[in-house]
Every structure is written in structure tokens, then in C-alpha cells.
Amino acid sequence: MNADVAGLLDSVDAVLLDFDGPVCSIFAGYPARDIAAELVELLHRHGVDVPSHLAGKRDPLEVLRWTGTATDQRITRLVEDALCEAERRAVETAAPTPYGREVIVAARQAGLPVAVVSNNSAGAVGAYLAAHRLTGHVSPVIGRAYAEPERMKPNPEPISRAVRMLDVPPTRSVLIGDSLSDIEGAKRAGVRVIAYANRAAKLDTFRTTEADLVITSMGPIAEALVARCEGEEPESLGGGISRRGNVGAALRDGEDQAALAENSDGTADRSPRDTELLH
Ligand SMILES: [Mg+2]
């Protein structure tokens, strides 16, 4: 597995990251189901006849997607604005993904540009990156198109836009994502894709997709990027977490060293309870 990860990363010139999953669990402290319920309540208040299946949704992005197909642009903008505000609140209690930060910093150390391509709003992503001192490491940040939910992944357009902005061929780019939308969007954009199964339930599903690789931890990605910095082959790792010291040693910037300690705690990857498979 780790040799596969290293081989794939050696063949790309840019790293694209989905946000919710590979970078953090955005709704760790402000549950997605609560936000979804608030959006449904907003629709009710504006006289929208919400189908019963939507009322039980745990994913606010699904509520927005439905709103875009079933209501007018004024209502879609209301829901979009409410979701943007909720996401900005959510990032304040987002849980960093183990090794998510290391992947970003190690990729930059290896000379690879890092972009975020997210179905969350760019404002929320930017706020998270700023709070975690990652702003200077990530560009561009491509978030959800305002009040146009049909342009969210699996629409390949935001992924293609990131690749164009980085001036890298799609086939020399890889997207790391934790949803079927990421996998489908990347394949349609001609970009390679690593599927991050951050919950056991996703593993079997992802293995039946066109994902180039399926991983269960961001650790092996970080390890391979650090090895690339050091010009060496990554060691064979059980679970990809035993070389944490080397990860830190390769990242010499003082701010990064301090920040790396924040989530190099050796804990198992958290399972975002409220993230639907689609997002
Ligand atoms: Mg995701």
C-alpha cells in the first residue's frame, strides 16, 4: 500500500484536497444534522413545501442541492447564505484530520502546489486555513459556487478549474477525497484520485469505484511526501504512523514544527459521524 501511495505521488505535480474529510471534520462540534434541520426550518418559514425525505436529511449540502432543483433563485440564495454562515461557525469547532496538516506542509516542502476543492464555502475553508496557519500553503481555495449547487462535485468543473489555475495537466494531478462525489468528479476531470475511507463503512464502497487508490489514514500520504522531500523510499509501515518523528524532522520551519505537534498525537483517525458518503 505505501509503495503504491509513493508511486502515485511520484507521478504527480500537484495535490488537490477535498476539505471536509482529508483536512478536517468541519461539523465535529456543530453537527451537520443540526444545520440540515435549520435549513429545512428556514424553507418551512418561507412557505416551501419540503418533502418528508428531506426533513430527515443529515447533510446540509443535500438540503441545498434539493433547494437548487426545487425552488427559485431567491430561496436558493437564502439557504446558501444560511449555510455559509453555519459553516463559518462550524469551522471554529472543526476537528483537524490526523495527518491532514502534515500532508499539506509536506507537499509544499516537496515542491508540490496544494489546492483545496470543496463543496463547502470558500469562506469557511479560508477561515479554517487561517486559524490553523495554513493559508500560505494552499492556493487556490475553490469552494462551492454561490447559490449554484448543481456546480458542486461530482460536477468536475471546480476540479478542472483548480488544475487550470495551477497550470498542471490533469493527469499529473491527484485529488484526495472522502466521498463518491470526489471520485466521480476527479475521474470526469481526468484527475487521479485517492479515496480516503475515513469510516469503515466507506471502504467496501470505494473499492468498487474507479479510485486509483483507497486509503484509511492520511498518514501514508504524509510519509510518502516526506520521503520525497528526503529523496528516499518510504519505509514499510503498519498503518503508516510509525515514522512521526521523521515527518517532523523533515519539516524545518519553526511555525510548522509547532503546529505539527498539534495533531501528531498518534490517535486513530476520527470518524466524522455526520458526513454522508456523498460528501
Ligand atoms: Mg469530503
Image: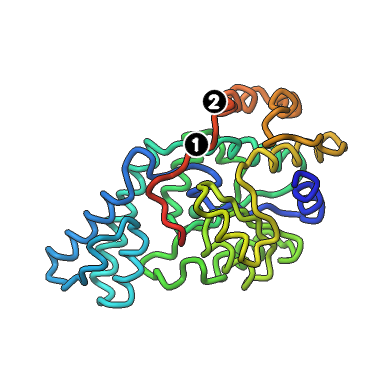
Q: Position of residue 244 (x, y in %)?
A: 69, 27
Residue at horizontal 73 percent and vertical 48 percent from the top? 112
**Which residue was labeled with disc 1?**
96
Q: Secondary structure at mark 2?
A: helix
Could you tell me residue 11's position as x and y percent? 81, 55
Residue drawn at x 61%, y 55% is 195
Q: Camera-side residue: 4 or 143?
A: 4
x, y percentage for residue 205? 55, 61
Report the front residue among 166 and 65.
65
Vertical arrangement, residue 82 with respect to residue 125, above or below:
below
Closer to the camera in the image, 145 or 18: 18
Please identify the quarter of the rendering in which residue 8 is found: bottom right
Q: Is residue 254 left or right of residue 130?
A: right
Q: Is residue 60 above or below residue 247?
A: below
Kindly identify which numbered label has been placed on residue 262.
2
Q: Circle 2: is it few (<14), some (14-19), or many (20+) Cα within 10 Å?
A: some
Q: Earlier in the sequence, mark 1 or mark 2?
A: 1
Circle 1/circle 2 CB separation < 8 Å:
yes
